[in-house]
Image (tube, helix red, strand yellow):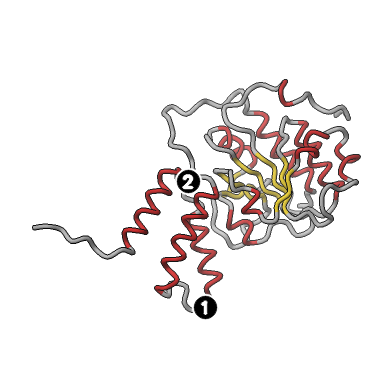
Amino acid sequence: MTDHPSPAPSALSADLAPPPVIVLVRPQLGENIGKAARAMLNFGLTDMRLVAPRDGWPNPDAGPAAAGADIVLGNAQVYETLADAVADCTHIYATTVRKRGVTKPVLTPEAAAKQVHATAGRSAYVFGAERSGLDTDDVALAHSIITVPINPDFSSLNLAQAVILLSYEWSKGRELASPPQVPLDPPSSHEELEEFIQHLVRELEPKNYFHPVARSVATMRTLRTALTKTGWSSNDVKMMHGIVAALTKPPRRTSR
């Protein structure tokens, strides 16, 4: 390994799908953010997004740890919530060592990388805080889970190590992925799907779907989990808006 940064992204070969974004949720230490940025640039990734970093941003400890990955830190964007950070993404991967009670497809880093290369829209790899990882609601927002096969007797994997594993697997497939055989409908972004979920909730609440109140949070989580693993296109979401609207309107009179 060498301490010299990798070539600028423009020198890398063109990919068949947009590079994934790296989302760090509630990162705690600036130096860990810097190390993650270094790991990203080693494999040609430059889009870092930070959700509620504990010590704010920019962080003076990030630069030295990045070892020259200034382009990543300089372009890093900060968001208040994970939903905001991935609003333009069509497939969201939560990295976690366990499912945390949420039923989602579970992939290895290699399998996830192959899926990213075959996805028309932008994908996001989401990492949790150093000590606690992603919470249940973070994982529920994702479409799939990535779990790294690791020694069960010593499962300590730091943030930069996790970032470099996923970045490396993604980089291996840049020249090997095959384009889709048939044109695909534009995939739904998280923002579009979230608008539909809120539309559905507005119609369900007056019908007491979320009764009893004590179970409303769990019911909402189950509903969101089911809807975020469908892989809908933008046209699918528009159709579902129309279906819900039709179900809530009085029936049309038809002439005989």
Q: Secondary structure at mark 2?
A: loop
Q: CA distance from mark 2 to mark 1?
A: 30 Å
Q: If you read the primary sequence from the N terminus, does the residue marked by circle 2 or circle 1 appear first? A: 1
Residue toward you, 44 or 195: 195
Q: Position of residue 84 (x, y in %)?
A: 63, 52
Tell me if residue 183 can be seen.
Answer: yes
Q: Position of residue 131 (x, y in %)?
A: 79, 58
Q: Is residue 87 left or right of residue 171?
A: left
Q: Which numbered tag is attached to residue 161? A: none
Looking at the rendered image, the quarter that the N terminus falls into is top right
Amino acid, disc 2 = Gly
Q: Is residue 123 above or below residue 105?
A: above
Quadrant in the rendering for residue 38: top right
Q: Is residue 49 above or below residue 196?
A: above
Tell me if residue 154 can be seen.
Answer: no
Q: Position of residue 183 (x, y in %)?
A: 43, 30
Quadrant in the rendering for residue 46: top right
Quickly name the residue at label 1.
213
Please tell me how crowded label 2 is: few (under 14), some (14-19), or many (20+) other residues with Cα within 10 Å. Answer: some
Amino acid, disc 1 = Val
Quickly name the residue at label 2.
231
Q: Secondary structure at mark 1?
A: helix
Please tell me how crowded label 1 is: few (under 14), some (14-19), or many (20+) other residues with Cα within 10 Å. Answer: few
Residue toward you, 149 or 123: 123
> What residue is at 31 percent from the left and 63 percent from the top?
249
Between disc 2 and disc 1, the foreground one is 1
> What residue is at 70 percent from the left and 38 percent from the top?
47
Q: Is residue 117 left or right of residue 205?
A: right
> What residue is at 45 percent from the left and 71 percent from the top?
205
